[in-house]
Image (spheres, rainbow, N blue to C red):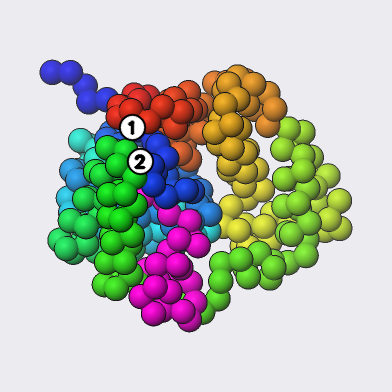
Amino acid sequence: MAEARDVAWYWRHPGLPGVDLLRARFVRHRYGRHTHDGYAIGVIEAGVEEWHYRGSTHRAGPGGMVFVGPGEVHDGHAGVPEGWAYRMLYPPVDLVTDVAAELGRRNGTPRFPDDAVYDPASARAFRAAHRAAESGDVLATSSLTRIAIATLLRRHAVPRPMDPADSTRRLPAAVTAAREILHERLADPPSLHDLAAEVGTAPFVLLRAFRAATGLPPHTYLNQERVRRARALLDGGTPPAEVAARIGFADQAHLTRHFKRIVGVPPGAYRTARTFKTDGEAAS
């Protein structure tokens, strides 16, 4: 009997700028700890996914809707030997808040308090939108995606008074300065000792403060930022090997390893699926 393969396709939404989608079946794949600038919303179609989020371990099986908020650290892996299959939508904060405002909810960024729910109506609306996005029908998919987001907001969201951007402004000064240095020096970052010296603190003090403020230690945060920058370069048509060199990875294999741990697909497959609008799958 053939061993099940990890298979994934990651593409741009054809009708809503800034929205990404993922359809995948994972058995061996494990996401590293990471965050998203916007929301991550999905439905499990088979198997079980397990993930660590908000200090607890969570599991969801077929029909389960999963939610991760902007800037919240999480990971993900198979919760059963046969893995899991799912569909994911990654809408930016402004799209979700726009839909919320159209529903009359204007008092803050929406928050999904439950990490996973079993709600057939929400799952049906979400699947319809996700499947439409595979066809490339701009009007249908943009309409169905807004309907799906509105359904989820009505049934499962509550207002969050503080905008996520405010948390960046409230970071300790040393952490803010360290982040800026890492952003500026992706290809040639300093050691922890030198980074701490540049921001005027001790290495272990900075390490603890950085992890407390961002949920990630500086080296993990750096690799996430490198992957974020890699996505922008790949979207612009830069070949993966050149991307790796420009953002500080040792080689393309190094880029691929970190890219897959955060995005779920290798950089070559990511670039191909987002360049061409035809349906298809990119196997890892």
Residue beneath label 1, please?
8
Residue 37 versus residue 257: which sits nearer the camera? 37
Residue 52 versus residue 65: which sits nearer the camera? 65
Q: Which of the 4 quarters of the picture holds residue 163? A: bottom right
As helix, strand or loop, the secondary structure at mark 1 comes to strand
Residue at horizontal 55 percent and vertical 76 percent from the top: 162
Please provide percent x and percent y for residue 21: 37, 43
- 255 left or right, relative to 159: right
User: Disc 2 marks which amino acid?
Assistant: Leu
- Residue 224 in magenta? no
Residue at horizontal 34 percent and vertical 45 percent from the top: 138
Residue 145 versus residue 82: which sits nearer the camera? 145
Residue at horizontal 81 percent and vertical 52 percent from the top: 196
User: Disc 1 marks which amino acid?
Assistant: Ala
Region of the chain picked out in magenta, as a range: 89-112
Q: Which of the 4 quarters of the picture holds residue 40? A: bottom left
Q: If you read the primary sequence from the N terminus, does the residue marked by circle 1 or circle 2 appear first?
A: 1
**How many numbered dots are placed on residues in this image?**
2
Residue beneath label 2, please?
22
Please provide percent x and percent y for residue 137: 30, 42
- Seen in the picture, residue 152 relative to 101 is either above or below; the reply is above
Residue sticking out furthest to the front: 139
Please provide percent x and percent y for residue 39: 44, 57
Q: Is residue 71 visible?
A: yes
Q: Do the CB atoms of the residues marked 1 and 2 lie less than 8 Å apart?
A: yes
